[in-house]
Image (cartoon, rainbow, N blue to C red):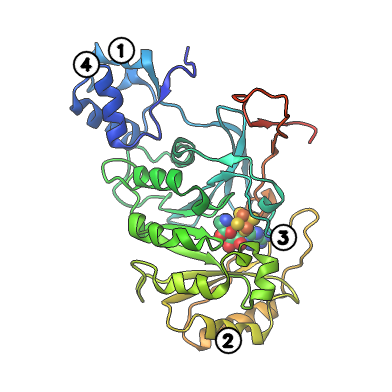
Amino acid sequence: MMTDEHKNLIGLERDELAAELAAIGEKPFRAKQLWHWIYHRGEGDFAKMTTLSKEARPKLAERFRITRPEIATEQKSQDRSRKWLLRFDDGNEAECVFIPEDDRGALCISSQVGCTLTCPFCHTGTQRLVRNLSAAEIVGQMMIARDACGEWPSPKGGRMLSNIVMMGMGEPLYNFDNVAKALRIIMDPEGISVSKRRITLSTSGVVPMMARCGDELGVNLAVSLHACTDDLRDQLVPINRKHPIKELLKACRAYPGANNARRITFEYVMLEGVNDSAADAKELLRLVRGIPAKFNLIPFNPWPGAPFECSSPATMKRFAQILNDSGLSAPIRAPRGRDIMAACGQLKSASQRQRRKSTAPKDAPKTAIMDAGE
Ligand code: SAH
Ligand code: SF4
């Protein structure tokens, strides 16, 4: 029987894995073997690790486990997108979405349960931050999607799960350490091996962390711009009050590794009558001058009680055309998975932040799940 006393090996970096094994008297090559089984082969059962000696297998199973998050529910969209609601060891839940194309596909990974930020067009933003996800819980999302795609051992090419977008629930740069650790594991060439060029991290504009994201991870950056004046962006993306547009664009100009071949994506949600005029498009062009930029126009995805409407197709087309006329790519994203509430900004879980009672002992868990009936 596996218990919490068994330490989960998923989410440990190579040196941490080596240290765990050294502590029980195993040689360093064991860590390399295990890494290969866990992250290249996707194996979770020590007994099946045939390159390990017969003595080593039960010894490891006695102390460790290799467990993914539990799948609470799985939904499949008419357009073949798949959404998993994952339940973690403490009962908290978060969603993750696989968006297949014909010959490839992107996994949209969550970084937090809920979000501290409160962008009013985003469903996740209505859920208070419950907690950061651990590296294990972030890597676990990738492993579950890999299981579903049947892509173990790590294929060299031709993968259905070919790309990763850190665009699920939460603000990844507010959980940088765990996100960075998870992405380093995911990028490791002897394991899951997704190239940094196929990973895009989206931020609402956590300016102080952007340089580290580029320097230490080198992944593609997407920035949720959504407005071209501070007045409007203060409303739509409240982090703007702390890090206004000018500061944000300065960090974009300095983003390590950005060039004309690897552009920064500016995400722009199309909200009818709010940010979708021709004047807005022209102002956007002025703002991004000098930045290797491309746009991603996201039709607003509705959710129950949302205080916005999506711009009309004609308005979106006109908006895109103005950007295109200046030579900038600005595709209008076809919404995916709307029927299962899996599209951008529709993710939310029922996990709630528990009010801290003054009588609660100091070491009481700070979070809890309220399920059914919510
Ligand atoms: N917290 C990060 C990443 C997650 S959101 C961020 O804000 O960038 C991924 C993208 O979906 C962001 O650009 C976000 O602004 C956008 N989004 C949020 N709610 C949306 C909605 N209802 N419709 C369309 N896009 C939305
Ligand atoms: Fe958080 Fe991003 Fe949603 Fe804003 S758009 S509330 S930053 S998840």
Disc 3 element: loop
Mark 3 — residue? 120
> Cα distance, mark 4 to mark 1?
10 Å
Q: Nearer the viewer, mark 4 or mark 3?
A: 3
**Mark 4 or mark 3, which has the lower sequence index?**
4
Mark 1 — residue? 59
> Cα distance, mark 2 to mark 3?
26 Å
Mark 2 — residue? 322
Three-letter code for the amino acid on which mark 1 is drawn: Lys
User: Alpha-carbon neighbours of circle 2 within 10 Å: few (<14), some, or many (≥20)?
Assistant: some
Residue 244 screen position, x and y as percent = 58, 71
Three-letter code for the amino acid on which mark 4 is drawn: Ser
**Mark 3 or mark 1, which has the lower sequence index?**
1
The residue at the point 19 percent across, 27 percent down is 28
**Mark 4 or mark 1, which has the lower sequence index?**
4
Disc 1 element: helix
**Mark 4 or mark 2, which has the lower sequence index?**
4
Three-letter code for the amino acid on which mark 2 is drawn: Ile
